Image (cartoon, helix red, strand yellow):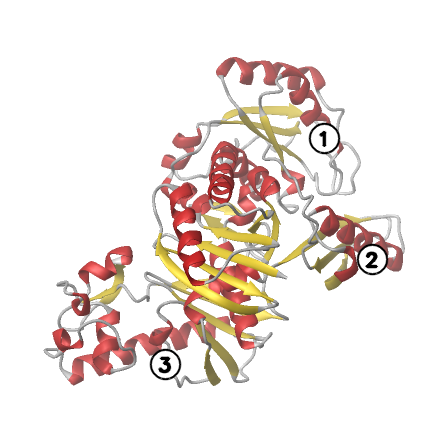
């Protein structure tokens, strides 16, 4: 299978051509403010290194969506419809958000009678008339996106579905996000994810259309997939509907790429970029998922996200002339202009590494004024910070293997306490694009099941996970279950248990893949 992997980062757009899991060609090009031309430039550069005929799929990872939330740009005003009364009215939707983000989204809030108990029984009947009124008011206000949340909808999503149908009938121009499709049981965290997704709906559609335009202009006739937070991919049309699933795809791609390039499925991955280092735990070839609340742009969320620790260490990290301060400021994408070795005037960690001889880059003679003591001191401090972060990510005191990837992988010391070995891999500087190209398709189920025996519940959820994977584009012949766990929920009746199953498979090579942006 011949695939192209692309990772559109804040500084560089990396692209690789992979055939049967072997890297044929790799390039790095500057990311542009114009999404289409940046991707197109990367494909053109890749074509100069290898012919791009017979491509079966193009997989793309991007930080566009999470950057939009962090920078508060490209966000739509949303209608926030919470089905909860007579309870859960003390906090309105978005109440604990940062002021600037709440102002950017300016939610139009509606609290509606309805919702379910923790065992799935309705609290009260759904107030259909109130939802119809809310839909008309949203339409009058010109709102084009709405997030619907109902109490305990992961156990019973009937009211959210019913509300979505009503909005579709009364105000069909509004793009609706239902919380049960995204989040877990916690009401506020699930609502936050639904509202963020709704706010990104127009931006997601525009961004995916820009990617598809770049693909069309490049002359490539291959289906487009976007990478998700869990290290798998989804069709471009689905990504346009659910952009929040792409929030952490950058570091996830790097971790998947580290596994693919090294052949190691269980290790700690240190991905050193221009500004930060992301450290995560690779478990059976996939990033370990976070089970706790994850803040995105200052908003509490609880959904599918990798367990990561980020520190301000990167190739562009600024170092004080006397070495007394290292970061967190970074020259970022200006590294080629501002670093000493490139003729600039700013001392960076890249200059320190060049002076120490750990990387051959630029004009090293411009760093001769740096004393050996200063260089050694800075390197020791960088190593200490990375070592401390790796230690925080470990789950046992046993020594672990560390895989160093990313453009700044040369900053990872070869020896650290609690680390058995540090692995550097060929093409590690484009591990993110390799990870995108080697991603698989997944289907996941995470729900409370009642009224079934344990075996019946597991079989039911496994069949559902497999079906979702196929619907997302997986080849049924390659499906396998990689995660399956169940936890009895003692406070619920009906032999209730929370079941979580994830199935993955290779991308179906059928070219009849047409998944329009919605």
Report if the CB atoms under discs 2 and 3 are less than 8 Å apart: no
Quarter holding the N terminus is: bottom right
Identify the residue position indicated by label 2 in the image: 458
Of the residues tagged 2 and 3, which is closer to the observer?
Answer: 3
Q: Residue furthest left?
A: 369
Q: Which residue is mark 3?
A: 413
- Cβ atoms under marks 1 and 3 closer than 8 Å: no
**Residue found at x 69% / y 31%:** 160
Q: Hey, which quadrant is residue 164 in on the image? A: top right
In this rendering, position of residue 362 left or right of residue 97 = left
**Residue picked out by circle 1:** 161
The mark lying in front, picked from 1 and 3, is: 3
Horizontal and vertical percent position of residue 206? 48, 34
Whether residue 246 sits left or right of residue 408 in the image: it is right
Q: CA distance from mark 1 to mark 2?
A: 25 Å
Q: Residues within 10 Å of mark 3 (few under 14, many from 20)?
A: some
Quote the CA–CA distance across marks 2 and 3.
44 Å
Query: CA–CA distance between discs 1 and 3?
Result: 53 Å
The earlier-in-sequence mark between 2 and 3 is 3
Mark 3 element type:
loop
- Rate crowding at label 2 as few (under 14), some (14 to 19) or many (20 or more) other CA atoms within 10 Å: many
Q: Secondary structure at mark 1?
A: helix
Instruction: Give whichever of 320, 451 is nearer the camera.
Output: 320
The tag earlier along the polypeptide, 1 or 3, is 1
Task: State which quarter of the image contains the C terminus.
Answer: top right
Locate residue 205, reporting x and y percent. 52, 35
Q: Is residue 446 visible?
A: no
Considering depth in this image, is 173 or 139 the residue closer to the camera? 173
Residue 218 in sight from this viewpoint: yes
Q: Secondary structure at mark 2?
A: helix
Residue appearing at x 85%, y 53% in the figure = 495
Residue 305 picture location, percent across and down: 55, 55
């Amino acid at each position: 299978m011949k695939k192209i992997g692309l990772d559109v980062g804040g500084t560089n757009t990396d692209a690789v051509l992979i055939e049967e899991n072997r890297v044929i060609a790799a390039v790095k090009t500057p990311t542009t403010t114009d999404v289409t031309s940046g991707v197109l430039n990367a494909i053109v550069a890749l074509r100069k290194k290898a012919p791009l005929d017979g491509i079966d799929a193009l997989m793309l990872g991007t930080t566009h969506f999470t950057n939009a939330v962090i920078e508060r740009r490209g966000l739509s005003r949303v209608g926030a419809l919470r089905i909860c009364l007579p309870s859960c009215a003390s906090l309105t939707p978005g109440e604990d958000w940062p002021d600037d983000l709440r102002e950017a989204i300016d939610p139009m809030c509606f609290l509606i009678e309805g919702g379910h108990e923790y065992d799935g029984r309705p609290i009260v009947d759904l107030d259909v008339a109130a939802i119809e009124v809310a839909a008309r008011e949203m339409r009058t206000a010109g709102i084009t996106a709405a997030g619907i949340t109902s109490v305990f909808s992961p156990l019973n999503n009937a009211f959210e579905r019913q509300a979505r149908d009503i909005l579709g009938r009364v105000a069909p121009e509004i793009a609706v996000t239902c919380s049960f499709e995204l989040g877990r049981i916690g009401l506020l965290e699930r609502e936050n994810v639904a509202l963020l997704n709704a706010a990104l709906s127009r931006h997601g559609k525009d961004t995916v259309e820009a990617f598809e335009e770049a693909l069309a202009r490049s002359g490539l006739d291959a289906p487009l997939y976007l990478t998700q937070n869990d290290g798998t991919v989804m069709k471009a049309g689905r990504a346009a509907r659910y952009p929040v699933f792409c929030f952490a795809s950058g570091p996830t791609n790097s971790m998947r790429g580290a596994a693919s390039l090294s052949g190691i499925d269980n290790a700690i991955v240190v991905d050193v970029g221009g500004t930060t280092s992301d450290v995560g735990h690779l478990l059976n070839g996939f990033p370990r998922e976070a089970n706790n609340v994850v803040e995105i742009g200052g908003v509490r969320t609880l959904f599918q996200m990798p367990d990561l620790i980020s520190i301000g260490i990167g190739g562009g990290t600024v170092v004080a002339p006397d070495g007394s301060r290292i970061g967190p400021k970074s020259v970022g994408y200006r590294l080629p202009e501002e670093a000493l070795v490139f003729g600039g005037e700013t001392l960076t960690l890249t200059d320190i590494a060049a002076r120490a001889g750990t990387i051959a880059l630029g004009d090293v003679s411009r760093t001769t004024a740096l004393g050996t003591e200063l260089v050694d001191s800075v390197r020791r401090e960088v190593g200490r910070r990375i070592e401390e972060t790796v230690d925080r990510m470990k789950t046992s005191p046993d020594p672990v293997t560390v895989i160093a990837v990313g453009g700044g992988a040369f900053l990872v010391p070869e020896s650290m306490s609690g680390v058995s070995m540090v692995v550097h891999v060929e093409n590690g500087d484009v591990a993110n694009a390799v990870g995108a190209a080697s991603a698989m398709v997944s289907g996941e189920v995470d729900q409370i099941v009642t009224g079934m025996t344990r075996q019946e519940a597991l079989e039911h959820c496994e069949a559902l996970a497999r079906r979702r994977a196929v619907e997302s584009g997986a080849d049924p012949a390659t499906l396998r279950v990689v995660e399956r766990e169940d936890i009895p929920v003692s406070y619920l009746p009906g032999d209730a248990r929370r079941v979580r199953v994830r199935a993955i498979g290779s991308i179906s090579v059928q070219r009849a893949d047409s998944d329009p942006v919605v």
